[in-house]
Amino acid sequence: MITGAAGRIGSVLRLGLRGLAEELRLVDREELEPDHDSEEIVRADLAELEAARAALRGAEAVVHLAGIPAEDTFERLIEANFATTYNVFEAARKEDVRRVVFASSNHATGMYPTGRRVGPDDPVRPDTLYGVSKVFGEAIGRLYADKHGLEVVCLRIGSFRERPGSWRELWTWLSHRDAVALFRASLTAPGVAFVTAYGVSANTRGWWDDTSARRLGYEPHDDAERFVSELDEVDADGEGLQGGPFAELGE
């Protein structure tokens, strides 16, 4: 099952995960049309727990992408990111779903300086309220893994694009092809209890330790460096912080 299936990542995974299971359930608040016999479409608002339970019923695993994918007001994030994420984990527990793959974000650690190598064991340093919502999702995933035995993989997604669009993305780019490989590995890796991993391609440059992703069986192939001639070289945004524009000081 994929939540937020109409979004940028969900649209790519819809095709990329086809064949991984007998049925792929696509859940979103937006209208979707099935384009394959193996697809089931569910229109639901996961901000309601009972709707989340109904959507997850019978699923073996869920990729949770639904939510606001950028900085927003706290009030909007509370419903779309905090409440919805809680509901997905609680529904997974109540409906005996085996594994949740949670789309976290590199913005959970975006306040680290660009010269610092960061791994999943380093303290979180979110750069926005959006980043805080992803830290919340990782924390509740840890709780449900430890307390309820749910298998949980939290993926700190980098810059998900067809090709890097800025100088910063030479460090943070996650290609469409590598994203599919990463989510496939996260859904199929054996012996998972709780894992946090950075989602990034095989870039020559990088700030993040991807050891835990490799342990899941993820083998990236794409390197942002081949696009370097297309980009204007600039200093990193956000005062030399890994979150780039997300890390800029606000009011």
Image (cartoon, helix red, strand yellow):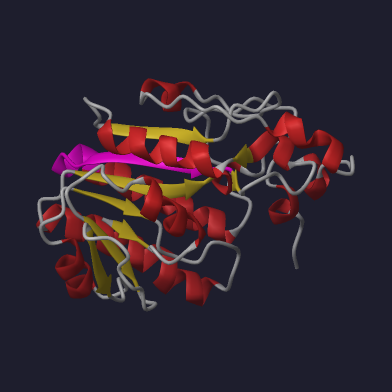
State yes or no: residue 157 in magenta: yes
Q: Residue at x 65, y 28 (%)?
A: 203
Q: Residue at x 46, y 24 (%)?
A: 219
Q: Nearer the viewer, residue 49 or 176?
A: 176
Rendered position, 251 above or below 60: below
Residue 146 in the image: state x and y as whole percent: 21, 37
Q: Which residues are magenta?
A: 145-158
Q: Residue at x 34, y 46 (%)?
A: 17
Residue 6 in the image: state x and y as whole percent: 42, 67
Residue 182 in the image: state x and y as whole percent: 43, 36
Residue 88 in the image: state x and y as whole percent: 27, 60
Q: Quadrant of residue 109?
A: top right
Rendered position, 117 above or below 1: above
Dividing the image into 4 quarters, which one contains the C terminus? Answer: bottom right
Q: Is residue 17 left or right of residue 223?
A: left
Dividing the image into 4 quarters, which one contains the N terminus? Answer: bottom left
Q: Is residue 2 left or right of residue 170?
A: left
Q: Quadrant of residue 92?
A: bottom left
State yes or no: residue 222 in magenta: no
Q: Nearer the viewer, residue 133 or 6?
A: 6
Q: Number of marks in the image?
A: 0
Q: Is residue 194 left or right of residue 191?
A: right
Q: Residue at x 30, y 71 (%)?
A: 46
Q: Quadrant of residue 147?
A: top left
